[in-house]
Image: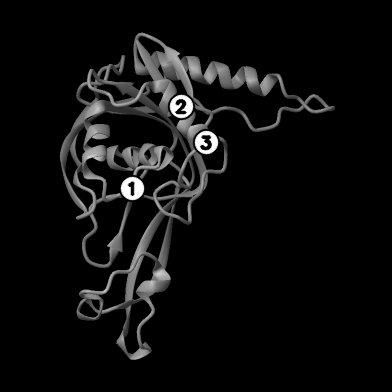
Amino acid sequence: MEFLIFQLQAPLASWGGTAVGEHRGSHEYPGESALLGLLAAALGVRREDDSTLTALKQGYGFAVGVQDGGSLLRDYHTAQVPGRSTLKGRPQATRREELAVPKHELHTILSTRDYRQDAACLVAVQAQVDAPHTLDALADALRSPRFVLYLGRKSCPPAAPLYPQVINADSARAAFDAYLARLEQERAAHLDKRGRPPFEDIAPVVRIAWSDGVTAGVSSDLSAPRKDRVIRRKGWQFGDRTEHVWLRNEGG
């Protein structure tokens, strides 16, 4: 079977979970909604296009191979926003338009936002029977995205090329191994004049998280609900899904 594999690395990433009150937390690795959003941005799908987003959600399964969960960075965040009554009936397509109101109608909101520093992971995409695009088409979109890609928040652009590759393998784990081998070949093929590789050693996958319907190739050490299954993106409505997690032991 075929898998589309790509990497996500950045100095900062933020994979938001359930937001309650003023705290905006972050998981150590992206969930289903974040990965769907990444593919949709690459394809040029807009947030209000519910039918296309639904087709993407139903057409693909994901597995995440965590290389490094990164360290926590917590940011005290302030922002100005108009009140709901001020915005009612006034469309705003940009942040500038949102703030184009008299200053006395702006309010300050406070929040604490979490980021993951120097996190790195691999993503495996497995197409289902009703997939709207081939994996090769998705790989092309990730190489030349229609919209800017970011890792959870607009302030978190990727720090390395996503390097999407379509790999034929028996499972997501086997595809991750083959992908890392290709990366190592690329690293060895681009030494500088002193024989040094262009980037640091490639980290192994230490954890794999996947949804039902994905051929992971490992046994689950933990299964738990995660509220990141998109119901309606425009309304920020998300439902639960079951996420399975495999943890690498010392023996591999």
Mark earlier in primary sequence (1, 3): 1
Q: Which residue is mark 2?
A: 139
Quadrant, the C terminus: top left
What percent of the width, then of the height, locates residue 212? 20, 25
Towards the viewer: 190 or 39: 39
Q: CA distance from mark 2 to mark 1?
A: 19 Å
Amino acid at circle 2: Ala
**Helix, strand or loop at mark 3:** loop
Dot 3 corresponds to which residue? 144
Circle 3 packing at 10 Å, graded few (<14), some (14-19), many (20+), is: few
Dot 2 or dot 1, earlier in sequence: 1
Tell me if label 1 and label 3 are in contact, CB under 8 Å.
no
Is 164 rendered above or below residue 232? above
Task: Name, please, the residue furthest toward the bottom.
Answer: 104
Q: At numbered mark 2, what does the secondary structure look like: helix, strand or loop?
A: helix
Going from N to C along the chain, the mark reached first, 2 or 3, is 2
Position of residue 203 measured from the top left corner of the image (x, y, whole percent): 53, 28
Q: Indicate the amino acid at tag 3.
A: Ser
Q: CA distance from mark 2 to mark 3?
A: 9 Å
